Image (cartoon, rainbow, N blue to C red):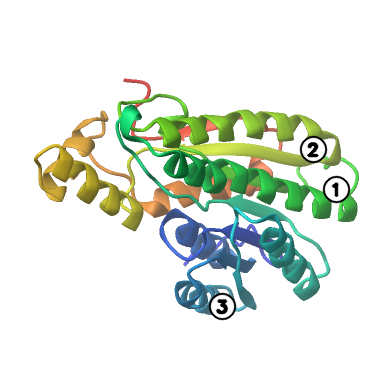
Amino acid sequence: MYIVKRFEDRVVAVTGGAKGIGRACCLRFADEGAKVAVLDLAMEDAVHTATECEKLSGQPALALRCDVADAASVDAAFKAVVDAWPEGLDVVVASAGIYSGQPLVEVPLEAWQKVIDVDLTGVFLTNKAAAVIMTTQHCGAATAGTAGRAIINISSMAGKTSWAASAQYSAAKSGVIGLTRSVAMELAPYGITVNAVCPGNTSTEMVQGVAATIAARDGLTSAEWLRLRAQDCPMKRLADSEEIAGVVAFLASRDAGYITGQAIEVDGGMVMS
C-alpha cells in the first residue's frame, strides 16, 4: 500500500489492462488513489482487475471491452470513460499488445498485419481518442509543480534494438517510438506529456507464451530459454511487471511534468550492453 496518493481522484485509462504490464499499471494507479478504467478484450480478467483496483483505491473502477485495432471500439470505450467520469481524463496508458515472430521468409502477410494492427495502429487509435478528449476538456499548458495530463505508450526494447525472426514485432514497437515523439510535439502546447516506456524481458503471460514458441524452435525448454534471456542483460534477471508500472506512474506524475517525447528503457541494461 502506497502512503503517498499521487493520483487521488484522477482518472486513468489503461488499454490491455486485464493482464501483464497493463494490469500492473492499473493496480499501481489504483493503489495511489486513481479511478481506473481497464480496457481489454479479455473481459473476465478485466473485471477481476477492476475489482482489485476498487479494493486498493476505494474509488470506482470500470472494466470495458476494447479492441484497440478497431477505431469504433476504441472510441466507444473512451466515450464510456468520459460518461462515467465527466470531470475529465488525466492519464492514458497504451499497453495492449501481442507478439508474433517467425523467420522473415516464413512470415505470412496476415501475421505481419495483425501485429501492426494491434501493436502500432492500436497505439495510434488510443492516442488519437485520448487527444480528442484531453485537448477539448483540458486546454492550456500545465505550470511547474501542477498535476498535468499524460499519455504513456508501452513500446519495447525491440523498438530500440532487433534480433532475428521478429520483424513484425520490432517494426511495430519502433513505430510506437516514432509515433510517441510526434504526438508529444502536437500535445505539448496543451500541457499533455507523451512518453514511451521500453520494457526488457518481463515476467508476463505473453513472455511465457513467447518462450514456449521460440524455445521449441531452438530445441530448448521454456525454462531454459527464459534463463538465457535473463542472462542477456547485466542485471541477470527478468523484470517484474510492477517495475515497469513504477516507471509508468512516474511519467504520469507531476515529478515528470517536464519530460516528454522520450522512450525510456526499463530493461536491466540490455540495450546499453
The kind of secondary structure element at disc 1 is helix
The kind of secondary structure element at disc 3 is helix
Which residue shows up at 62% across the image and 37% down it? 195
Q: Is residue 220 visible?
A: yes
Circles 2 and 3 in contact, beta carbons < 8 Å? no
Q: Amino acid at mark 2?
A: Leu
Neighbours of disc 2 within 10 Å: few (<14), some (14-19), many (20+): many
Q: Nearer the viewer, residue 97 or 54?
A: 97
Which residue shows up at 62% across the image and 28% down it? 178
Coordinates of residue 111 in the picture (x, y in percent): 43, 43
- The image quarter containing residue 167 is top left
Q: Nearer the viewer, mark 1 or mark 3?
A: 1
Circles 1 and 3 in contact, beta carbons < 8 Å? no
Circles 1 and 2 in contact, beta carbons < 8 Å? yes
Neighbours of disc 1 within 10 Å: few (<14), some (14-19), many (20+): some
Which residue shows up at 57% across the image and 41% down it? 120
Task: Say which label, 1 or 3, has the lower sequence index.
Answer: 3
In the picture of the structure, the residue carrying the numbered disc 3 is 54
Task: Say which label, 1 or 2, has the lower sequence index.
Answer: 1
In the picture of the structure, the residue carrying the numbered disc 1 is 135
Question: Would residue 142 appear left or right of 125 to someone viewing this image?
Answer: right
Q: Nearer the viewer, residue 272 or 74?
A: 74
Task: Say which label, 2 or 3, has the lower sequence index.
Answer: 3
What is the number of the mark on residue 187? 2
Neighbours of disc 3 within 10 Å: few (<14), some (14-19), many (20+): many
Q: Nearer the viewer, mark 2 or mark 3?
A: 2
The kind of secondary structure element at disc 2 is helix
Q: Amino acid at mark 3?
A: Glu
What is the number of the mark on residue 109? none
Q: Nearer the viewer, residue 211 or 260?
A: 211
